Image: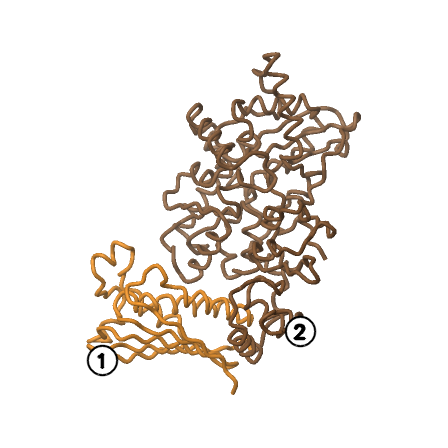
Amino acid sequence: MSSLKKCFNIRSRDFIHAGEASITVQQLLKQMRIDSALIRRIAVCGYEGEMNVVMHGGDGRFCIEINTERIVLDISDEGAGIPDIARAMEKGYSTASDAHREMGFGAGMGLPNMEKNADEMFIESVPGCGTKVRMIFFNRST
Amino acid sequence: MVPEFISFTEKFCTGCTQCVRACPTKAIRVHNNKAVFLEELCIGCGECIRVCQEGAVSSSVAPIEPFLKNKLNAAIVSPVLYAQFPGFTPADVLTGLKQMGFDHAIDLSYYIEMFQYAADEVVAENQKKHHYPWPLISPICPVVIRLMVLNYPNLLNHILPLKRPVTLLGGELRKKLSEEHGVAEEDVVLHHITPCHSKVVPDCSGLMNELGFVDQAVGINRIYPELLACMEQLKEKELNLFPNEHFSFVPSTRGPLWGMSGGEIAGMRTDGVIAVSGLKETRAYLEKIEMGLFGEIQYIEFRACAEGCLGGPLTAIDRYMAKSTVQKFIKMFGIGRRLPREKIRQLYDKGWFLSELEPAALIDIYDSTKNALTIDEMKQIEKLITRIHGNDCAACGAPDCRTFAEDVVRGEASLTDCFKMR
């Protein structure tokens, strides 16, 4: 099946450009007239994922693959990794630093929010090596 | 087709692509050295009017018609008008308008205050009932509303469902004036004096039925020279301390402040508010709201023009000069509050402020399902962009390489329009 794939780099601690990959993806999906509620869910997940990489990860990569049935968002980084994934998925659990909190982040809602907005989500993480998050959205409109 | 917001004189157009690049919705191309407008994408922001140095693109606001003797002419005054005359007070401006020949000059301050009160009420109610998602978005700027319909339809349910001050005023004005003066309703001519060229098109976004009752929109820049002359004449005669008459309410500073970015929220009690002006910034904020940010903010005032309505395309003086005039008014008069809250509350409870149309119903004004691109077409576009490897020079007549590639894939442009592909 034909699919469109696009990848973006995410730089660690680059708060200025954080969110740009999600915005570009938003625009692509709008050109394809994907259902607007679905675009919004993808945008929320993309942004939260990007912020996770910027705050906790090392450099990372943001890839999206779109076909008529589903949209797959892969966000991976070479950061510290998550030692206890079940704990990280709890609402309000956060390892953000004080500096992050001062910027308004670190409410501990990132991963729970992603899980809520994605149809399916998978996390793999190796402490010390990095984290991979895959989110799948079913494209019911086409 | 040329959008109804602008008037285009083809013989002046040199095909310079300034407007093509300035257009926020990519609604202009240059073909055969002439601008071509994609009417279905125009949100009436006026950026093309601002950048065109050849005078080929101008506002479609008509010049003011000569007053007919047997009609009652009333001017509904956008508060931005006051800011155009440093050295004069708002009352001078209203008097000057009468000197010019208007039978009435109607100030909007009271209606602005009422709107602000109602907006506070909606925010307070929403904190309890969560009927609308945060942040609520101001319904005031028609260009922002159209931008949202076109590009951010997801966010339409954020728009505050209230009528705008002019609409509130206009509802009963014609009837009252005709009763007051014993003339037939059709003999009352209402002129809306405005800095906003997108007000000329009736009912364009459905939210604001302003032109339904206003007979004519008049650009501030059209009447400026004549009005200034009248005001200077009056100043010499020292007649500028006119008492107010019916409908010619004494203006409060809320009016002039309203025209400035941040003026709408300055009159509200709600704390979690921000004001954003300029199209680029507005888009950036709307994108972020779409990504789930700003949930802790209650109300955002968006204005498509930088610095707010003071920067509108039909103003007569520079926006920063106008802003300085407004700031002087605030120093002189303060912001103040003049209306009895209980009375406005009664009107609010009766639903007087509520807009008849739910913002979400606006989605049909732009037909957005027509041109969906398939995955294969998207891949072709990506491939073309890699092949062109350009720097968005716009020499092809499209605003950037991506849009050009899209036009090629849609069959609306030829690849050889790009000089790198020849």
Q: Circle 1: is it few (<14), some (14-19), or many (20+) Cα within 10 Å?
A: some
Q: Circle 2: is it few (<14), some (14-19), or many (20+) Cα within 10 Å?
A: few
Q: Which of the 4 image quadrants contains residue B65?
A: top right
Instruction: Identify which residue is drawn at 69% across, 42% down.
Output: B61
> Can you identify the residue that label 2 sits on?
B411
| Chain for disc number 1 | A
B221 on left or right of A130: right
Query: Which is more toward the observer, B65 or B12?
Result: B12
**In the image, farthest residue toward the top:** B237
Query: Which is more toward the observer, A132 or B250?
Result: A132
A64 on left or right of B97: left
Name the kind of residue labelled 1 in the image.
Val
Q: Which chain is orange?
A: A
Name the kind of residue labelled 2 in the image.
Gly
Q: Which of the 4 image quadrants contains residue B38?
A: bottom right
User: How far across and how far down the image is residue B58, in percent?
Assistant: 67, 45
A44 on left or right of B97: left
Please tell me whether residue B326 is drawn above or below residue B28 in the rendered image.
Answer: above
Quarter of the rendering occupied by the C terminus of chain B: bottom right
> Can you identify the residue that label 1 sits on?
A126
Q: Which chain is brown?
A: B
Q: CA distance from mark 1 to mark 2?
A: 49 Å
